[in-house]
Amino acid sequence: MAYLPGFEHDIFISFSHVDNLSASGQPWVDQFQKNLEIAVAQRVGRMGLVKIWRDPKLEGDQLFDDTIESAIRESGLFVALNSSGYMASEYCQKELRCFHEKADAEPGGLRVGDRWRIYNVLLNNIPHDQWPKEFGRISGHPFHASEDPDDRGEPTDPELDKKRFREQLKALSDSLYKMLEAYREALSKPARAESAQPTPAAQAGAGDGGLAVYVADVSDSASSTRKRVVSELQRQGLEVLGGVPPPYDAAGHREKVQECLKRAALSVHLLDQYAGRTIDGEPERSYPQKQVDLARGEARACWIWVPQNLDLQEVEDEAHREFLNGLESGEREEGEFEFVRGLPANLVPQIVERAREIEKEGAAEGPSGSVLLDTHLRDQLHALELSKVFLEHGIQPFVNPQADDPTQNMDVLEARLREVSMLMILYGSVNRDWVLNRLGAALQLKVVKNLPVQSFWVYSVPPEKEAAALEFDLGPVQVHLVDNSSSPTLDPALLAPVFEKVGARGAA
């Protein structure tokens, strides 16, 4: 699920094969993507929320196939790594034209406010008059050091020219973040959010991991109320799931509803005197009724609303009258669902209040299934690889890159520690004292601020460390160690104790 509602990928990276070749060290495009993923994740607050896609198998003679075209059409933004090789590649130009044409035909087009959905990232100092017309009037984001118009220069080296690369990366990630936020808001407006019976994925408003509310199907007479509720909930920052049906057949419908219920913290059902459309293949039940049935057994929290002045004795459909009577007055298990009579004007505040209560109940139990990866800037690429493994095991990672002074940014560290059950400090290019100081600062915050973090870990990455350098003592608090410093590649098997501690799914 992408950060932008209605898309599978947030950002498509288009690049020339020649720009990712490397005689030594890391290929440039690989490094660029890894650093960009971390920089954007820092802005949105979580790893894995923003989906960045590029073709990892791109080769010089590859054809523009259905996979590439599909990825482009399912992407919200397009980042072109513009270079001499990019300008000479018909393959790259075709990707650019494909995105330009599809985006221009979408509601809202290529422009979001004063921002353009195509990003021109300049790996070489290419004159403006040579840029493809698809870039429009955008200024471009330089990733080179050349200021001489006659000198095309070379891509900024992430290792040899770290300061310049970080400055250029910050400018690009800041711009992408602002565009993502502006575009997400635009996509969540009523005209977009409720058009053409969107799918559950198309109605997602807050991205994976957000507080999600499932708004069930309604009768035609309640459709305008549902549209208003969906729109206002999205403006409140909640993720809204819905748009079911389609599918219309009983089995497919059940599967889609169950998919939504698994993701949602709260299931909302707006009922009135009309039953709604009957299910294909299951005529004794309407779609709204069936969704109530499913939610009663599977939703984490089920909230059923009817108009305050609804007189059940005046409901003409006998089966629907009995259905509503059973909900309001029939037997139910404790906590199975809430039945509410109310005014339409109070609907959204009531739903938001209930959703926030559920959120607080979860917070009161203490955060689980989440880890803060505290790392020096020099080791943040290791943090990215580690994040991917955690996400695969259902653990939400937060990445917190720091500079040389381990006592800086204590406010940021405190805020992050409030969201996690585990702290893991990466021990790579930094010295042992840096790690000890970060552990000490975190422990002090836990005690003084009564933070919920429960366990402390050190994850050692290359270069290889001697045994004495891997000893950490915080007195009464145990520091767990994972030593991956002797291998340049991450070994997920070493993380089995971590997965067991967090209680993540798929633990090795």
Image (cartoon, rainbow, N blue to C red):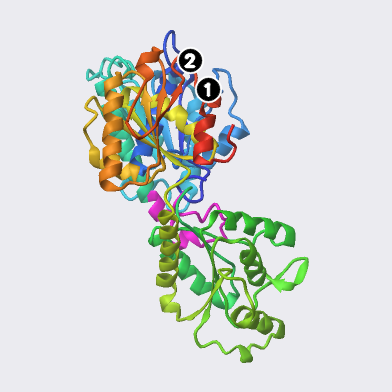
Does residue 449 sit above or below 499 in this rendering?
below
In this image, 88 relative to 173: left or right?
Answer: right
In this image, 189 relative to 311: left or right?
Answer: left
Type of amino acid at the residue the image marks with label 1 = Asp
Q: Main secondary structure of the magenta part?
A: loop
Q: Furthest-right residue in view?
A: 281
- Residue 40 x %, y %: 37, 37
State whether residue 449 appears in this view: yes
Give the position of the C terminus as an image quadrant: top right
State whether residue 14 appears in this view: no
Q: Which residue does the image show at 35% across and 16% down from the upper left?
A: 469
Q: Dot 2 lies on which element?
A: loop
Q: Residue 311 or 448: which is nearer the viewer?
A: 448
Q: Dot 1 lies on which element?
A: loop
Q: Furthest-front residue in view?
A: 476
- Residue 31 x %, y %: 41, 22
Q: Which residue does the image show at 25% across and 23% down from the upper left?
A: 164
Does residue 436 sit above or below 330 in this rendering?
above
Q: Residue 251 or 280: which is nearer the viewer?
A: 251
Gap in Å between the C-alphas at discs 2 and 1?
A: 8 Å
Residue placed under numbered mark 2 in the picture: 487
199 drawn magenta: yes
Contact (CB < 8 A) between labels 2 and 1?
yes
Span shown in magenta: 183-207
Type of amino acid at the residue the image marks with label 2 = Ser
Residue placed under numbered mark 1 in the picture: 491
Figure quadrant of residue 416: top left
Does residue 289 sit above or below 440 in this rendering?
below
**Label 2: how many Cα within 10 Å (few below 14, some 14–19, many 20+):** few
In this image, 328 relative to 477: left or right?
Answer: right
